[in-house]
Amino acid sequence: MKHALITGASRGLGLALARALAAEGWSLTLTARGAADLHAAAAELGATAIPGDVTDAAHRERLARAVPELDLLVNNASGLGPVPLPVLADYPVDGLREVLESNVLAPLGLIQATLPALRERKGAIINISSDAAVEAYEGWGGYGASKAALEQLSHVLAAEEPDVAVWWVDPGEMRTGMLADAIGAEEAATADEPEAVAPALVTLLERRPASGRFTRDGLA
């Protein structure tokens, strides 16, 4: 049985992907900060729930110890940063530091902690990115910079770890709480549900292409 560790798995894309993988027979370990929602998701899917914040090194170590056999790590948990989204001229440096902690340092720390298990089973890593990593949108400088950094880390990791597939994926806009916080609930309601995106990630696992950057449309 294949085993996946998914961060930010209590809602949104993390939960949608967990449901899709469970339907394919995967064993799952799920983590998120919201304990109640996480335990509900785990109960629904027969998964293991380990609540906590991936910016906490001790929590990352707990997660790594819980998955000595690991086929897939999904770094989905992410932070938006200050809202309303500030232009860079007014962006609080401490706020940017928190975004980088959530979106760059925490994923790298979890990758480092789980790499031995992933190497052993020639597993895969999916790092969830954004078009804000490669496009210039007003107000998205902090978040976009963090995702650009995550993409570059992914690119270098792919070169350094030839036995582990590393994919960084732009899933497109999704109807999530984070998007609503960024652009308003009314506009966010026009985006696709995360359940429409999860099948593309499952397709990625089925095809197992070479490491690289992918978009939802490119996987259709």
Image: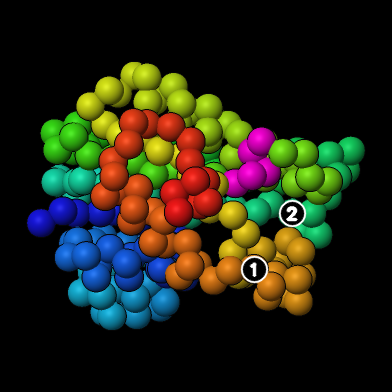
- Classify mark 2: helix, strand or loop: loop
Residue 140 belongs to the span the image colors magenta: no
Q: Please say if 144 is above or below 63.
A: above
Name the residue tied to disc 2. Answer: 82
The percent position of residue 204, horizontal first and vertical second, equals 35, 48
Mark identifier at residue 191: 1
Q: CA distance from mark 1 to mark 2?
A: 22 Å
- Residue 147, position in %: x, y? 59, 40
69 on left or right of 21: left
Residue 98: x and y in percent read 63, 45
At horizontal 61% and vertical 34% (from top left) the residue drawn is 148
Q: Is residue 149 above or below residue 132?
A: above
User: Is 142 placed left or right of 9 in the picture?
Assistant: right
Q: Nearer the viewer, residue 67 or 73?
A: 73
- Determine crowd level at label 1: few under 14, some 14-19, many 20+ residues with C-alpha closer than 10 A: some
Res 10 → quadrant = bottom left
Let me know if residue 29 appears in the view: yes
- Seen from the viewer's position, the closer of residues 89 and 176 is 176
Q: Main secondary structure of the magenta part?
A: helix
Point out the stretch of residues depicted in magenta: 130-134
Task: Please state which of the two labelled residues, at mark 1 or mark 2, is closer to the viewer.
Answer: 1
| 47 relative position to 14: left or right | left
Q: Quadrant of the C terminus?
A: bottom left
- Label number found at residue 169: none
